[in-house]
Every structure is written in structure tokens, then in C-alpha cells.
Image (cartoon, helix red, strand yellow):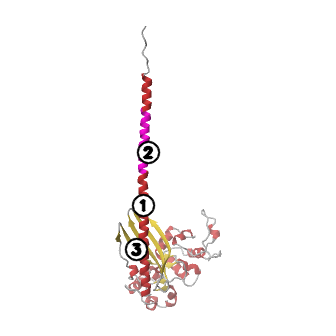
Amino acid sequence: MRSHPQTHTPLLKRASGVALLTVLFILVLITTMSVYLVEEEHLGIRRISNQRDAEQGFQMTAGAEQWALKILERDGKENNVDHPQEPWNALLPAVKVEEGTLLSEVQDLQGLFNINNLASGRDDVWYPLFTRLLSVLEINEAIADALIDWIDADQDITGSNGAEDADYLGLDIPHRTADRMIADIGELIWVKGFDEKTLTALSPFITALPEKDIKININTCPPLLLRILTKETLPEPAADSLMESRGESGYQDIETFLTRTEMAAESDNVEPLITISSRYFQVRSEAKFGRLTTVLLSTVQRKPNGDKAIVLKRRRGLS
């Protein structure tokens, strides 16, 4: 009697195929996990490296800040006239430090118009000056009233173009007026009538200092601010002449400036607006270390007697 051969070969082949696929799947899984773990390790190393570079950059900028403070203090002890040729405005160019570079610059903030001077409202000193600035820049002068209302502590609307809480609470992003001095000019974007275009035009000429009645330094301000000191805006050639006459060492006294022909019959109006000595500065320190660039912006106040400079606020950034 002939026996029939057993036919299990297809089953064996199928089982072998499944086992092979399982092994391949495990290999792919292990490979994927290995790549993931290696990548995670690389990212971890990168994060640690970036943290190190950021911290090192911050320490470098903090050191540059302190150096600038010492320069300002020494200058304040030596004289009471601030102009662009002084040591604080002639710090060293970018220098190599360890594995990076360090750059520090100082700007006289009193060479700009302090918008918190408008805390006095529609006065006879700062309000006309600000409206002249708006006019020269071809910006609607009506926004001056809205800015006053943003700063003052009451809910009384200034003029016909002011704006208090009721004007802001109905907006898509409702908010209230600050009812305090402005801490940073970027805050102006929330004020009625201000937009990015307005801020772009204004920002080279304004600052926000923590007190009012801060005078403009005629030795460090741009020509446009010299033009608007008088009741009738000066023509550009007149401002250029005032710039030229201050020379490298600036005006050494207010009287010399007020006796200029461009200031004829305007001295009483101009004198309350100007100074030749500054107390507020901005120190910009930039450190490049590793892959990162750290920037530290420090608003500095030099005390009236000039022997001490302190940091009022800092803003730190990375790039």
C-alpha cells in the first residue's frame, strides 16, 4: 500500500515568513529607537551648549554694562556738560573676549523728547513742543490728547480727541487706559491713534523716562528736535547751522545757544525746554559667544551730583 507524502511545506514557509517579518520589524524598531536616542542626545548637548553660551553672553554684557556705568560716573564727576565727544560716547569698538566678541554703546536719552513730560497735560511748555513734532513728521496732532489721557490718573477726556476707558473697552481687544507714566514707547501701540507707521516715524525722536519735565540736551539731540524748540518751527538750514555751531565739544552754556540768531526773541520760550547736562542714558551691550548673540539694553540714571549711576531697568534678548 503506497503512503502519501505529508504536505506541511507551505505552512513551514508561511511560519518562516512571519518570523522573518517579525525580526525585520524588531530590527527597524531598534534602529528607529537608536536614531531617536542619538538625536535626543545631540539635542540635549545642543541645549546645554546654548544655555552655556547664553549665560556666558549675559555675564559678558553685564560686565560691559558695569564698565559703562563707571565711565558715566567718572564723566559726571569731571564736568556737567554732555556732548557726543565725551568718553561715554567713545567706548572701544568690538573687542575679542575669550571665545567671542563684546560691543558696548551708550546713548543719551535726554537727546530725545520724553513723552512722559505730557503728564503735565495741555501745558504751555511740553504740549506745544510735542504737537510741533507731530506736525513736522506729518502725523495727526490729535493723538497728543489721547496720549495725555493714557498717562493722567483721571477719566476726564482731554479736548475733543482724547480717549479714556470707555473708548477702549468696546474694542476687539478691550483694555483700559494705563493711568500712569509710560514705561516703554512700545506701549504706545495701545493708545488711540497710534499704529506701527506712527511709532516708526516717532521712535527716533522720543523716549519714556520715569519722571516728567525732563529737558532736551541740545548737544546730543538730532536736528529735527532743534527745529521744534521755537514756537514757529525753524527751517532745516537754521537747524543745520545750530548743529554746526555746537562743534565737537557742544555748547558749554545755555546762554551761548540762546544768543544765536536762530533763537532771536525766543529765549524765554526755549530756555525751559533745554539743558546741556544729562542724567538718563541707555547702555546697549552686545556679546557674541558660541552660536548665540546676547543683547542687553539698560536704562541708566546718573544722580544729579554725578557721582553715582544706577540701572533702572534691563531688557535682555537673544539672536
Mark in front: 3 vs 2: 2
Q: Residue beneath label 3, please?
A: 104
Q: Quadrant of the N terminus?
A: top left
What amino acid is found at the position of numbered circle 2 in the picture?
Answer: Met
SS class, disc 3 = strand
Note whether 249 is above or below 51 in the view shown: below
The amino acid type found where label 3 is placed reads Ser
Do tag 3 and tag 2 residues touch (Cβ < 8 Å)?
A: no
Residue 101 at x, y = what percent? 36, 69
Instruction: Determine the residue positioned at 43% across, 25% down.
Output: 12
Q: CA distance from mark 3 to mark 2?
A: 47 Å
User: Hey, which residue is sitting farthest left in the picture?
Assistant: 96
Q: Is 270 a magenta residue? A: no
Q: Residues within 10 Å of mark 3 (few under 14, many from 20)?
A: many
Question: What's the mark number on residue 195?
Answer: none
Name which quarter of the figure residue 51 lies in: bottom left
Mark 1 and mark 3: span between their CA atoms? 22 Å
Residue visible at 38% across and 72% down in the picture: 103
Name above or below for residue 306 compared with residue 46. below
Tag 1 secondary structure: helix
Q: Main secondary structure of the magenta part?
A: helix
Residue extending farthest to the top is: 1
Nearer-N-terminus badge (1/3): 1
Distance from Cα at disc 2 to Cα at disc 1: 25 Å
Pinpoint residue 70: horizontal percent, then vertical percent: 43, 80
| Magenta part of the chain | 20-39
Numbered tag placed on residue 50 in the rendering: 1
Tell me which label, 3 or 2, sits earlier in the chain: 2
Tell me the tag on residue 33.
2
Compared across the picture, whether 288 is left or right of 148 comes to left
Of residues 131 and 84, the one drawn nearer to the viewer in this rendering = 84
